[in-house]
Image (tube, rainbow, N blue to C red):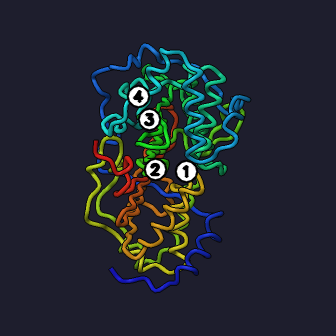
Amino acid sequence: MKQGTQSVARILALFAASFIGTAQIAAAQPTDGKGPPPPSGDDNNTNERLGDTSILMGAVQIPAEVESCADTDGHARLVCLADLLKSDVSDEVLDNLQLDYSVAEAKNWSNLPAGAFPARPGVFLGEFSVKQRGIAKAILMEAASLTDNEGYDEMEQTLNADDYIGSISTDYGVGYASYNSKFAFLGTPAETGTWQLYYGGHHLALTNTYTDGLLAGATPSFRGVEPFPRFEMNGRENMPLMQEREAFAALLRSLSDEQATAATLEGTYRDILAGPQAGDAIQQAQEGLSVSELSADQQALLLAAVQTYVGDINDADAAIYMAKYMDELPDTVLGFSGTTEVKDEDDYVRIHGPSLWIEFSIQSNKSTGESGNHPHSVWRDLDDDYGGNTE
């Protein structure tokens, strides 16, 4: 790979300037687009516990009890809030909330709705009381970005999407409702040791892993949404993943004909490669256009696209990841398939660096019975997935 000649200072300045108006594109994999089959077992009694109601997470208030953690922030605040939540739930709920840590359990995330993937650990959000949901909300807001359409706000909009699907879908009873996203602690939240904040459901997976008080890994981080790009639900307009799409489209539109040819991947990608239970699908060989061949302006657009993923976590941890990926730019590659507008079925984008792997894929609607498309997208770190743990 050819070494980039742009100064880091110039790229950072351009990145900061371009982030506000960036574009998103889609990444996909050569499959039938249906995702992994649902497991045969239901050890968590998921299907008996499914709900069909909206929990209206946007209207849930943070309870006054959270003020007892006001003197802490960052990881210490997460531990304080976790202890507060655990002290408030019943023994039955606690049995599903506080679990032992293992990578095998952490890998039980999926793009599928709750009833189609019963292996997810944890408590359904709908099984918490309203006050307990408020504490869980405070935990998620501490771990995630508070920027509009990123981080926590993106989580809330994804819950609204399931409520939307549930209101119109004639699909089988797989649990399309915000009630059915899962929340768990894998390992005991504490200042020492390893634990994971597990949150996810249909079209979302948050897998923040902490070791000895520090974020050891924020990936895999999965986002998807249907319908797309916009829909009205629960008293607001929702458009999660629009910022990713717009960031990628801006980047791809900036390519010259020669650059676009070099970045074009062979074949058709119908879904992401490195989806649920598919970390081994990440290939070692890089395919596409070396980022070192991009201008400073174009590199800034690429960093703006990366920020829409890294920016889902809290600002302090996101800055560490962005500095890492900045250093890796000369050895990073951009690839895409389909159109540069990233809005049509089978449009796909991939950014592949020494540790960075991002994919964005556009598929047809599957659950609403309406015409249109929906994206799947994933951020993985080849060093830090599951906090770098193997067991």
The mark nearer the N terminus, 1 or 2, is: 2
- Sort mark 3 into few (<14), some (14-19) or many (20+) by Cα contacts within 10 Å: some
The disc at residue 99 is 4
Q: Are marks 1 and 2 in contact (CB under 8 Å)?
A: yes
Tag 3: residue type?
Lys
What's the distance in space between the residues labelled 3 and 1, CA to CA? 29 Å
**Quarter of the figure with the C terminus:** top left
SS under mark 3: loop
SS under mark 2: loop
What's the distance in space between the residues labelled 4 and 1, CA to CA? 23 Å
At a point 39% along the width and 36% down the height, the residue shown is 109
What's the distance in space between the residues labelled 1 and 2, CA to CA? 8 Å
Asked whether residue 160 is in view, the answer is no
- In this rendering, the answer to whether 246 lies above or below 100 is below
At a point 66% along the width and 37% down the height, the residue shown is 69
Q: Do the residues labelled 2 and 4 touch (CB within 8 Å)?
A: no
- Sort mark 2 into few (<14), some (14-19) or many (20+) by Cα contacts within 10 Å: many
The disc at residue 218 is 2
Of marks 2 and 3, the one in the foreground? 2
Q: Do the residues labelled 2 and 3 touch (CB within 8 Å)?
A: no
